[in-house]
Image: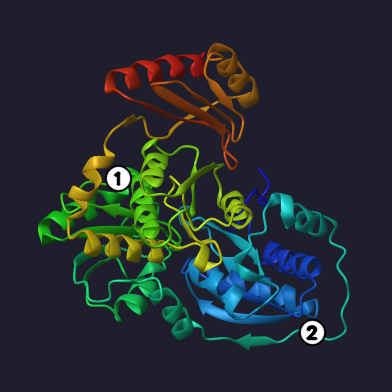
Amino acid sequence: MSIFRAYDIRGLYPKDLNINTAYKIGRAVADFFRAKSIAVGRDMRVHGELLFNAFTKGIMDQGTDVMDIGLISTPMLYFASAFLKTKASVMVTASHNPKEYNGFKLTRQNAIPVSGDTGIKDIEKLYTKGKFRRKGKKGKLIIKVIEKDYVRHVLKFVRRKEAQFKIVVDAANGMAGKEVPLIFNHLKHTVIPMYFELDGTFPNHDANPLKGETLTQLKRRVLQEKADLGIAFDGDADRAFFITDEGEALPSDFITALIAKSFLKQRKNAKILYDLRSSWIVPEIVKAAKGRPKMCRVGHAFIKESMRKEKALFGGELSGHFYFRDNWNADSGIIAALKILDVMAEEKKPLSELVNPLKKYYATGELNFEVKDKEKKMNELARKYKSGRISRLDGIRIDFKDWWFNARPSNTEPLLRLNLEAKTKELMKKKKDEIVKIIKR
């Protein structure tokens, strides 16, 4: 599989990405953007500094200046892309992937992502040809410190600055270990840190909260400390997952519903986006709060585009990404965490009590299957369930009166992903078994 993917450039170090490939990618990126300067930051991965140095040398050899914004989270890069008014910015990260991976996330000014369709394929062509423009004068490396300005920006999202909760935070040895203290030192909450040391070897567990086993220690600690909330971040801190005071890991669509409801108290009739894997409960809560729900396809590049197009106030994705209009439509794990703390303070109820009314339907969670011909399998499902309401927004989603399912091809792996929800547990299990049988045959 090519390292030039749908949402970013990513691969194994040093097999796919090394100082030679990073240098060439830097030259291709500079030629593609033709910007006066490009902002570049990196996370704590072991080979991050090596790749940063090679990548930025490639940029400067093309005559483009590099704004070095240092060791940062991806949301900090998104902020920098707007704050520094640079035409392009790049984050050296592999997000939640295991320690062997690294890569580059690219954005235009104001955190507009560069995807396969909007530039990554063009950069790949430049990289493959290897014929770069020649510049006589090399670019400069300019150090930029953005932390104080970033903190001021993020704290604007806090409505209840007087709130005091006990929170256990698992940074997974990722960039939240730097970002959380920067923000929470200005608030009254008590933060109990887990794995805040920046360590790209991830010695305690993978920095991927989507894997349920990575949350086991956090759940236990929340109960031991009698904490109000547990928060788990991924490696580059753009995603956040939440544990209730009773030690329950919450699906991210519940978090979308709670944050949307809170926003809509102040901004009636606002549009709220949710990805098509989300529970029926999300549009129900949004409508009840006098908002306008809008279903969208999966993937941060697509959702950010929809946020801009629809002028949406807020959007949530089942993978733990949460998007905010007042954050240049970009995702932020830390802002999502602050909004959930606001919700708890406003409602004066524990999180476990706040989510109880949302437990109305029964979902399978995301199930993954290796499928040779994904398009053929989705067409087979469409024929089998043609009596339902069919959408091709992302893969295939078919809705019935008392259940629905979505089967969509992965953009990054040879997998077909299934999500299914029903009004009863029995129906959910029955339909899951039925569809799994079709997918596997």
Real-space Cα distance between discs 2 and 1?
48 Å
When the figure is inspected, residue 18 is found, relative to residue 372, above or below; the finding is below
Residue 380, image quadrant = top right
- The structure residue drawn at horizontal position 88% and vertical position 84%, both measured from the top left corner, is 136
Q: Nearer the viewer, residue 286 or 100?
A: 286
Q: Nearer the viewer, residue 403 or 130?
A: 403
> How many numbered discs, if any?
2
Left or right: residue 24 compared with residue 254: right
Residue 213, label in figure: 1
- Identified by mark 1, the residue type is Glu
- Give the residue pinned by disc 2: 138
- Identified by mark 2, the residue type is Lys
What secondary structure is marked by label 2? Answer: loop
Left or right: residue 309 compared with residue 127: left
Q: Nearer the viewer, residue 297 or 248?
A: 297
Residue 384, image quadrant = top right
Q: Position of residue 115 (x, y in %)?
A: 67, 54
Q: Position of residue 145 (x, y in %)?
A: 52, 86
Mark 2 Cα within 10 Å, few/some/many (few <14, many 20+)?
some
Residue 340, image quadrant = bottom left
Q: Position of residue 163 (x, y in %)?
A: 22, 72
Q: Pointers 2 and 1 in contact (CB under 8 A)?
A: no
Query: Is the N terminus in the top left, top right, bottom left or bottom right quadrant?
Result: top right
Whichever of labels 2 and 1 marks the residue nearer the N terminus, that label is 2
Mark 1 Cα within 10 Å, few/some/many (few <14, many 20+)?
few
Left or right: residue 310 compared with residue 275: right
Q: Position of residue 125 (x, y in %)?
A: 81, 54
- Residue 434 visible in the shown view: yes
- Residue 171 visible in the shown view: no
What secondary structure is marked by label 1? Answer: helix
